[in-house]
Image: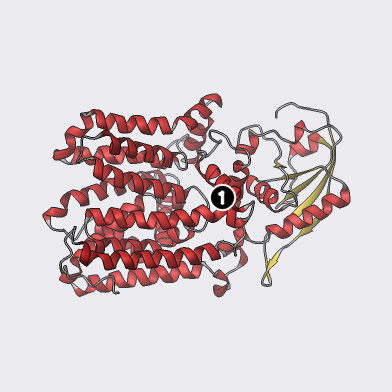
Amino acid sequence: MNPCELTPRNLAPGNHVQEFPYFRATLALLVAVTLFRLWYCTTLGLLGDEAYYWVCSRHLDLSYFDKGPGAAATIAVGTRLFGDTVFGVRFFAVLLSFATGLSIFALARMLFSARVAWFSVLLTVAIPLFAVGSILMTIDPLSVFFWTLAAIAFWKAKDTPEFGLWLATGAFVGIGGLAKYTNLAELLCFALFCLCCAEYRSKLRRPQFFAMLGASLVCSLPVLIWNARHDWITVEHLVHRGALDGSWHFSPTELSFFLVSQAGVISPLIFVGIVGSLFGPRLAPEHRVAIRFLLCLFLPLFVFYIVLSANKAGQANWTAPAYVAGVILFAAKWTLSANKARWIRRFSIAAVIVGLLESLALHNTHWFRLPPERDPLNRSRGFDCVAQKASDLSVKEGTQCFIANKYMLASLLSFYLPGRPDTFMPPTLKVANQYSIWPGYRTLPSGCSALYISDTVKIPKALLNDFSEVKLLDHIIPTYRGNSLTEHYFFLCRGLRATNSNP
């Protein structure tokens, strides 16, 4: 089936006989892709972020220093079902990608037609950011899924006085916020939509709208309670990460880097198509409200991060939820206008093909023979070897615990070491991550020995102060298919001095 066969034969919303083939094609595509992802996700080692969320899942709490409890709680369920395995960690990431695909189809179908919905799902499958996010268990699978559910619920709620859908909308926003705080911005998107549409402006004063806000607040209580108990350190962290704690200055280099990274993770042609759809082509008047809704879901988040990145470039995945509206907008405008110009049809087909090729290439970067430091998949390789070396040295030297120089390395060691022990980090003067909050090695009995693993030969002052002897034991350079990976060093730390004081 050609996604860009774009004549509107009998495709008015509600013509279920004509629209069923598009749903059937979408379901077949999603099932096939999901089965592949369930297999493929077991072929890659964990990334540092995934391992960090896995460690958090072993210490379940209302929230954490830099993230809400969503990812950790989801991983806890997955590992309860399938054990502390890569499949257990990633199972729900793949399942959520399937559910998100169906939700995007439903949203696009409600706004336009099944044909637009089919093309929207095809775009999400082709986009590298979504393809990677559908395999890795980070905060993004949860964020995008609940962002889409909230959009569906609000679109239905806006035309009814019943409280149920309004409360569901707020709940979906709040639950999404437990994974990624960005999801809370969807409330502003809904408010902006009501403000921009005269027929819905009165909704801003109705009790249903405030019920939606209240439901979102209730679902956000775990994060609020945890932060109230920890001096609101998450707020301080977010301000620092967004470079909002210093003077703002315009940097063309940072802004350019952000835009290039967006084009890279979305796929250049799809990114151009999404941005182009912000300006044209114009659709029939009956699509006015739907287009405005999508613009209100996309622009606030996208523009905010553009402004933020004009000072310091943000991470490429920060805008992920906004692209739910972006792909539907692209699909609607280019699909419904393709019969007016042949180049639109050709561009749409090329965008999907290029995106699919990029996403496929990301599944096996070895084809490109990239330098090790440029291969993104190397972030998931070699840590089982590092952990095995650390285990062997620990047995040989009789150490009682493991310490790592970075939180991602500490988390990966915890996952890959035999017995999956808790791994520590050197204490710091300032809270830097969740390891700074959890009990550290200073709570162990004095005289203990530790093995310190680092990707640099530099020894932190805290270790030199806390142990009577710190010396280099060995090093390892893991390899993958003949290519060298990151070198790691192993230090023996003997004689933990008696202290329970914080740094």
Location of residue 251 in the rendering, given as x and y in whole percent from the top left corner: 41, 48
Q: Residue at x 79, y 27 (%)?
A: 499
Residue 244 in the figure: left or right of residue 212 = right
Which quadrant, please, contains the C terminus?
top right
Q: Residue at x 16, y 58 (%)?
A: 282
Location of residue 161 in the rendering, given as x and y in whole percent from the top left corner: 21, 35
User: Does dot 1 land on a helix, a strand or a loop?
Assistant: helix
Q: Which residue is mark 1?
A: 78
Query: What colour scheme has been applied to the protein in the rendered image?
Result: secondary structure
Residue 356 in the figure: left or right of residue 63 = left
Which quadrant holds residue 157? Answer: top left
How would you rate the neighbour count of disc 1 (Cα within 10 Å): few for under 14, some for 14-19, many for 20 or more? many
Q: Residue at x 16, y 61 (%)?
A: 12
Which quadrant, please, contains the N terminus?
bottom left
Which quadrant holds residue 347? Answer: bottom left
- The front one of 322 and 492 is 322
- The front one of 363 and 235 is 363
Amino acid at pointer 1: Gly
- 378 relative to 357, above or below: above
- The front one of 313 and 377 is 377
Location of residue 279 in the rendering, given as x and y in whole percent from the top left corner: 22, 56
- 328 relative to 419, above or below: below
Location of residue 398 in the rendering, given as x and y in whole percent from the top left corner: 87, 46
- The front one of 102 and 490 is 102
Q: Residue at x 84, y 41 (%)?
A: 449
